[in-house]
């Protein structure tokens, strides 16, 4: 059974930075796609960023230029570097992995990010 465990969330002031990590319980080398999503209170979960096994990354317009997604296959870990944080970035952030038949197969439990103004 595959497990994804996020960490790195917390409380930060607007303009600050955080780095989220998502550790996988097995090798991610062959995983075709990994991503970060987020869900704010009272809102639907939304896409943040994705990274393929090889190729270009992709970001939502709301985080483009401020967030950077990366993966370290040797450490079986996905990252999200978040800079210039805004209060509207406050949400629970989830990592997802292995895209198949229109959905991700694996999800983490989430990590809370709170940005104060």
Image: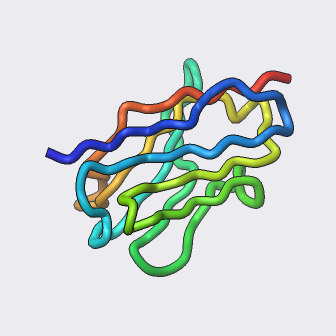
Q: Is residue 56 above or below residue 48?
A: below
Q: Is residue 57 above or below residue 82?
A: below
In the depicted view, which residue is nearer to us: 28 or 32? 28
The answer to which quarter of the image holds residue 18 is top right
Left or right position of 71 against 19:
left
Tell me which residue sits at (65%, 52%) in the image: 81
Residue farthest to the bottom?
55
The answer to which quarter of the image holds residue 20 is top right
Left or right position of 34 against 87:
left
Q: Quadrant of the N terminus?
A: top left
In the depicted view, which residue is nearer to us: 7 or 82? 7
Left or right position of 67 against 108:
right
Q: Quadrant of the C terminus?
A: top right
Q: How is the image coloured?
A: rainbow
Residue 48 pos. (x, y %)? 57, 49
**Number of marks in picture:** 0
Residue farthest to the top?
42
In the depicted view, which residue is nearer to us: 21 or 117? 21
Residue 45 pos. (x, y %)? 49, 35
Residue farthest to the front?
75
Residue 89 pos. (x, y %)? 69, 35
Tell me which residue sits at (75%, 42%) in the image: 17
Tell me which residue sits at (75%, 28%) in the image: 12
Residue 37 pos. (x, y %)? 50, 44
Tell me which residue sits at (39%, 67%) in the image: 73
């Amino acid at each position: 059974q595959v497990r994804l465990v996020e960490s790195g969330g917390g409380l930060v002031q607007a303009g600050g930075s955080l780095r989220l990590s998502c550790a996988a319980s097995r090798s991610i080398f062959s995983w075709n796609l990994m991503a970060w999503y987020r869900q704010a209170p009272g809102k639907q979960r939304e896409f943040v960023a994705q990274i393929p096994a090889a190729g270009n990354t992709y970001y939502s317009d709301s985080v483009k230029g401020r967030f950077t997604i990366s993966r370290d296959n040797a450490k079986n870990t996905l990252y999200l570097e978040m800079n210039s944080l805004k209060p509207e970035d406050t949400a629970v952030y989830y990592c997802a992995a292995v895209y198949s038949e229109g959905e991700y197969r694996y999800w983490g439990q989430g990590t809370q990010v709170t940005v104060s103004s």
